[in-house]
Amino acid sequence: MFSSDQETSAALNSLTTVVRDQSRPLIMWVGAGVSSWAGYPNWLDLAAEMHSKFSREESGYNKGLSSQLLNEAKYPQLFEQMRIANQHRYFTFLSTRFRPQVTNGVYKRFIRAICNLSNTYIVTTNVDEALERSLPDHSTIQRSDIECLSQLLHQRTPFICKLHGSVSAVESMVFSQCDYDSIQVDNVYLDALQTLFLNATVLFLGYGVRDEYVLRRLQSSSVGRSLFGTGPHFIVTSEERTELPSTIRRIRYEPEQADHRDALQILEIIADFVKSQPIQAAQEYEEKTYRSKSLYYIADLVAPGKWSTSQTISFAPLEGEGQHQAIVGEGYVNDEIEFYNYSALHDIVVGLLCFDVVCVSIDHLTSAHELLGSEAFWIFVESGSLRLVNPPSVPAILFADIQSPIGNLGMMTPSNNNSPEEFSPISISERIRKQIIPIKGKESEAEKLFKILESTVFDMSGVKQFDSIVRKTLGALTNPSIRSMLGFSLGTPYTNIPKWLSFPTLRLAKVISNGIICQNIQASSARMIFGSEKLASVAFSSIEGKEWADNAASYVLTGRFDSDIGSIIFRERSLLLKILQFRESSVGENFRREVAECLATDNGSQIVTAINAGLTQALSFDVLQKAHDQFSSGLFIHRDTSSAFTPVVWGDLRNSDARIARWRKRSRTMLDEESKRQKLGPYDECPCGSGEKLRFCCQKALS
């Protein structure tokens, strides 16, 4: 996630404005950090590896001086020592180390992001040729031809410019001190760079901007246009860099994984703000993977009847007078939800047919028990097909008083006590027993089942990652795509949560929490509804499925692709036991394996989980027909009930943009109510704390 600091937020806003207005071409400056996603070493690893090799095998290698250079990170001087010791070994090692590699999911995600942009201009200091292989339609420009860059930019011809040479021409590679010395006196080369800095916006990705000749050209380009300035340029970094030129704006991120894949989200943000025709990438062999157990996490489960998804709590502060207020829960209302195309039982049955294990939150235990019926529920629990997840503390928006229009995001933990002084969290055992009440005389039998259920719970309450939900949510809110989606004005301070945007913020925090749950239980897919899946796709950079497991499950049960199988099961409860028999058959196991192999997961995304069981491709008809025949053999689905199959368009799988538009419509109504309460006109100061006029701030964002 991006950092939630003001500098990053301002830089993201500035970058998206540059991209949207297209006033200057955007050039991607790609460094070694990107090549590391393709399996190539960074400078430290390469230098250390070569130093060990030369120290052991080259008697003329100055080991003492070279060790000092390595410790001081003076890599060009170090490579110079190696080149002096044995030039043949030096070039042979480099050419071997940078030969073609099998790229992983992170690099494929990078290429996919590049392909979602049109007219992409790339300059790179990397000597490997992964970019050229992946983007064959781009013109490749070597350093010797660098003066033609201006013409290509003018003609809007996509290119890859190899600033430091290519492994296929080893003597063109720039590693040693003499290589750097040669380019620093190459005026054609330096002038071409300065032209780029003067006339384009440069985004540095995977590149630390530490080369002295680059820093000097950045400085001189800004001096040359002291009145109107140059740039702006941007660097995506996880480091504190205070020595960068003033023309470079930092977009900071907090790396959640060692490979720094978080930086890739910047390209996905840019794609949301530019009109483009996707570029076709070179195809690579996709190896299918299948986990030992496929898990389906149902993050939201809404049963028919009356229900509530939020609470507003008032409480006294530990010190002082007055009343604090907290809003907890996602706060969905009927205007934001269409129940004609949603069935909680449908979701459970899809999971049972298509996945090895179905997981639901312990908060939805009552609903799952009632939907399946007691007999089937306990059979699935005892077979290991159904498990509970005990989530962590819940996100909340905290307000200093009940009239305050601005709150802060925090966390709250369910407690047995109302008093903060006597706080004690509710245990898993208590949560189970509060939701399922045994019949009198059956207490001892029920207790055995409760203990079985308790033993299957994924307990997330102690997972340290959940301590970062607030930070990650605020980081996600610096993403201009997410702010626009939720209706946040770009002027609203990033730490301020206006009351009218409480529920969209809490829904985002719930998505972040669900992502952490999926990581920890290694879920193959997560089911999200009411528009949350759109947020999840953006926040986690997940790829979208082309087909749906819903369709496959529908065909297995009914022979049709468009049935509400929840309504069928509701009428014919005994089908649940038939599902258990199907799951235990070899055909059922093979069907679940086929689903797992087709899931639209991507090991390069932030969360390696398919959203709403999207599939990369439809299951073959032979697999579907065999599963349908196995399920239907000896089944009692009568001819007179087949006409009662409920066809349904699963809008919550495909129309999430429209759903989130309803979120903004509701937020606008709440904003208008707050403006009326405060007697604010369109030209009064916006109550979000931006200092801007209401008309041009939150009203515009929610229009």
Image: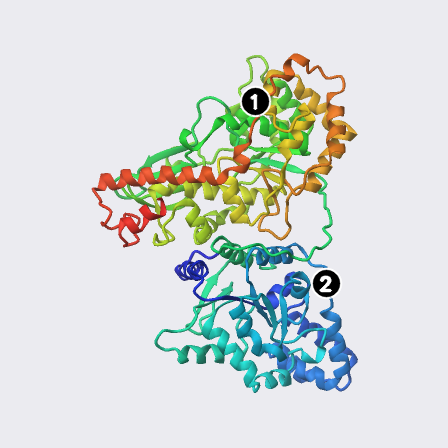
Q: Is residue 105 visible?
A: yes
Extreme residue toward the left, this view: 679
| Mark in the foreground, 1 or 2 | 2
At numbered mark 2, what does the secondary structure look like: helix, strand or loop? loop
Question: Residue placed at 46% from the left, 65% from the top?
Answer: 250
Compare residues 287 and 120 and report the one nearer the observer: 120
Amino acid type for the residue under numbered disc 2: Gln
Question: Residue placed at 37% from the left, 37% from the top?
Answer: 666
Residue 81: x and y, percent? 68, 84
Compare residues 587 and 445 and report the one nearer the observer: 587
Q: How many other residues sit within 10 Å of disc 1, few (<14), some (14-19) or many (≥20)?
A: many
Q: Can residue 402 be seen in this view?
A: no
| Residue 347: mark | none
Query: Is 338 drawn above or below residue 156 in the view shown?
Result: above
Residue 78 image-quadrant placement:
bottom right
Residue 93: x and y, percent? 75, 75
Amino acid type for the residue under numbered disc 1: Leu
**Image color mode:** rainbow
Question: Residue placed at 55% from the left, 77% from the top?
Answer: 211
Residue 159: x and y, percent? 59, 68
| Residue 101: mark | 2
Going by the image, does 589 lie left or right of 532? right
Residue 125: x and y, percent? 60, 72
Q: Name the residue under label 1.
A: 371
Residue 550 image-quadrant placement:
top right
At numbered mark 1, what does the secondary structure look like: helix, strand or loop? helix
Question: Residue placed at 30% from the left, 53% from the top?
Answer: 690
